[in-house]
Image (spheres, rainbow, N blue to C red):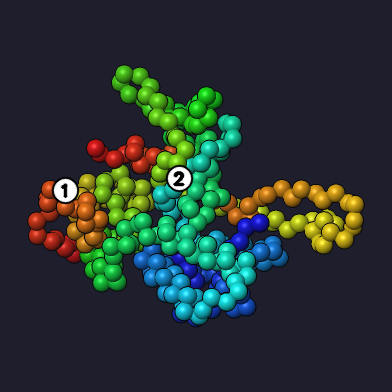
Amino acid sequence: MCLPMPVRQLEWSLEGGVCIVFSPTRAEVVYNVGLCICLYDITKLEDSYIFPGDGASHTKVSLGFFDDIIIPPESLQQPAKFDEAEQVWVWEYETEEGAHDLYMDTGEEIRFRVVDESFIDTSPTGPCSTEASTSGATEEVQKKEAPYTLVGSISEPGLGLLSWWTNS
Amino acid sequence: MHNFLFFRKDANAALLSNLEVFQLLTELKQQRKDSGKHKQSSGQQNLNTIMYETLKYISKTPCRFQSPEVVRDFLIATKGHKLTKAEKLQLLNHRPMTAVEIQLMVEESEERLTEEQIESLLQTVSSILPGNPEEELQRPSAMGAEEEEV
């Protein structure tokens, strides 16, 4: 993890150097600094948990303190297929006896590599961004987009479910 | 809405180990505790949540068995291995036990490290960075005297 130095000068107050970002007006600072209390190196390995994606889409991963992490299908161990019944991705691991299906079950601990990060401007646009003073106007449902997302990959040896790689 | 902590300092970050972050957060947590529980805004509560969750995450990593002395010894021992600061940080934070993990953490390891060098790195990691004492008891002691690679 990275933190700007010197650490001792940081003020943990809302008015000081460290603030909690509620509104996206701080977005530019978040953009420069990154996530929460730390910057992630692009190639950082993390242990994390898998949460189900929806359909043949990205696998969601959580670190507990941050969970806007996705692994796109092409970055899974290949070849991979999506099991509709179980609603999880499966690594069709090749052995001499043919393909052995390794399921990426929800809640399993994985090791992944951070390969990209993306910042999205989530500032609300339009009249509903300010106080709802316009009575009767239907409020637009704000699409819940994460201002900061990490993209991961598990397509290298040693990545993916920890259970795939432990000698037991 | 997502809440973040951020630092309005130069984004030119220095590398800190999980141990240092853990110590920092623990200290800050204590400071906030000591300053008394005033009516906490939801912002403060969110800050608490993030700190709590991050501490929870970090305390499950190998840094929980580390001390500044261990970190220093490790940096000395890995001096001759020609690793970048970021790579040493990965080794420190993750305490790899297999060659596959070393290869993930060291860029272009096939070109930079021989098999013997990988083995030597693994030895250094497991002998200087403490593992889970309970697990260590179960493993047959294959290390003998502490080796330090220069």
Q: Nearer the viewer, residue A115 or B50?
A: B50
Residue at mark 1: B139
Give the residue displayed 46% in from the left and 65% down from the top.
Answer: A2
> Could you say whether the residue bearing mark 2 is in a helix, strand or loop?
strand
- The chain holding disc 1 is B
**Amino acid type indicated by mark 2:** Tyr
> Measured from the top left, where is residue B109 in percent x and y?
32, 49
In the rendered image of this protein, does residue A46 appear above or below residue A81? below
Bin the neighbour count of mark 1 within 10 Å (Cα to Cα): few under 14, some 14-19, many 20 and up.
Answer: few
In the rendered image of this protein, does residue A87 appear above or below residue A132? above
**Amino acid type indicated by mark 1:** Arg
> Measured from the top left, where is residue B76 in percent x and y?
24, 68
In the rendered image of this protein, does residue B45 appear above or below residue A96? below
Question: Can I make out residue B10 in this image?
Answer: yes
- Do the residues marked 2 and 1 share a common chain? no
Instruction: Tell me the number on the disc at residue A49.
Output: 2
> Could you say whether the residue bearing mark 1 is in a helix, strand or loop?
loop
Image-quadrant location for residue B121? bottom left
Bin the neighbour count of mark 2 within 10 Å (Cα to Cα): few under 14, some 14-19, many 20 and up.
Answer: many
Q: Nearer the viewer, residue B30 or A116?
A: B30
Give the residue displayed 66% in from the left and 50% down from the top.
Answer: A145
Quadrant occupied by the N terminus of chain B: bottom right
In the rendered image of this protein, does residue A148 appear above or below residue A56? below
Left or right: where B77 falls relative to B142: right
Give the residue displayed 57% in from the left and 64% down from the top.
Answer: B46
Label 2, label 1: how many angstroms apart (C-alpha)? Answer: 27 Å
Left or right: where A30 falls relative to A126: left
Question: Can I make out residue B76 in this image?
Answer: no
- The chain holding disc 2 is A
Q: Nearer the viewer, residue A108 or A7?
A: A108
